[in-house]
Amino acid sequence: MTSSRFDLRGKVAIVTGGNGGIGLGMARGLADAGANIVVVGRNETKSGAAVADLSQRGVKAISVPTDVTDQAAVAAMIDRVVKDLGRIDILINNAGMSIRKPPHELELDEWNKVIDTNLTSAFVCSKLAYPALKASGNGKVINIGSMMSIFGASFATAYAASKGGIVQYTRACANAWAPDNIQVNAILPGWIDTDLTRGARQQVSGLHERVLARTPAGRWGDIDDFAGITVFLASSASNFVTGTAIPVDGGFSVMA
Ligand code: NDP
């Protein structure tokens, strides 16, 4: 029964940044496999639209407005999920942002904002969700890295540091939580068409064409490209896969 390995019916998944972009693509994949979804983000209008989209797929979806850089708010969110939905099986640490400046121009508060949003939030959410993930008996954590987990770029000062850090954090958690049957993996997106990169394309002339030329698949990624990998890493199909960092990049990271 191959299909049952990917069956997520009855599971509860938290997706930070699940109200748009890659997070929504992942949430849609999980919902289509039967998981109930908790959308975590700050923009309540976007989160309401995402909940409507996910609910149409026949699962329970709720929004818990939360700033993931606020530890007390994350703790309240986790408590509410356990109280209202009874369990947490899957945590996706996807919320992220970038401030594009070279190292000598980036201010300390800008550095802290990027690190807090992209890296420290994954630590806080994972630590606070850990008791429920352990209690689920087969918990899954998926952290979102980037091509900047592998490569560098002059404008990606704090962003590259945060995304390199997320891979090493993933490996530490994979080791620590293997005895609890919790698998922890990272996904490294290539260039994906979202609000984040639409901004970059407006700021950086020629970026659109450079990405097309540098990506063997010859296209930008779409948020739907994240559904399959997410269901795999969230399901029992991946129970012997942990501590990995899997590029979803149309070949970007293997092009010489
Ligand atoms: P979007 O800007 O479309 O989405 C970012 C999401 O993060 C939004 O849902 C936003 O929700 C949420 N978010 C940001 N800050 C916070 C916060 N403090 N608290 C709670 N939620 C927050 O970008 P993408 O979909 O492109 O990015 C998603 C992830 O993928 C990020 O980690 C990004 O670094 C990574 N990535 C993206 C790539 C791409 O090409 N697009 C490439 C490589 C990695 P809200 O505003 O409502 O809070």
Image (cartoon, grey):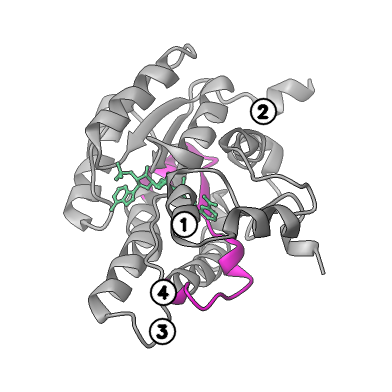
Q: Earlier in the sequence, mark 3 or mark 1?
A: 3
Report the front residue among 223 and 26. Answer: 223
| Crowdedness near tag 2: few (<14), some (14–19) or many (≥20) residues, C-alpha within 10 Å | many
Q: Is residue 97 magenta?
A: no
Q: Which residue is mark 3?
A: 103
* Quarter of the image where the N terminus is located: top right
Q: Give me the C-alpha separation between circle 2 and circle 4.
A: 36 Å
| Crowdedness near tag 1: few (<14), some (14–19) or many (≥20) residues, C-alpha within 10 Å | some
Q: In front: mark 2 or mark 4?
A: 4
Q: In front: mark 2 or mark 3?
A: 3
Q: Position of residue 230 (x, y in %)?
A: 60, 39
Q: Which residue is mark 2?
A: 6
Q: Give me the C-alpha separation between circle 2 and circle 1.
A: 35 Å
Q: In front: mark 3 or mark 1?
A: 1
Q: Which residue is mark 4?
A: 158
Is 66 situated above or below 100?
above
Dot 2 beta carbon under 8 Å from ligand 1: no
Q: Which residue is mark 1?
A: 200
Report the front residue among 167 and 105. Answer: 105
Q: Position of residue 233 (x, y in %)?
A: 63, 42
Q: Secondary structure at mark 4?
A: helix
* Quarter of the image where the C terminus is located: bottom right
Q: Earlier in the sequence, mark 4 or mark 1?
A: 4
Q: Earlier in the sequence, mark 2 or mark 3?
A: 2
Q: Amino acid at mark 1?
A: Ala
Q: Which residues are magenta?
A: 131-158
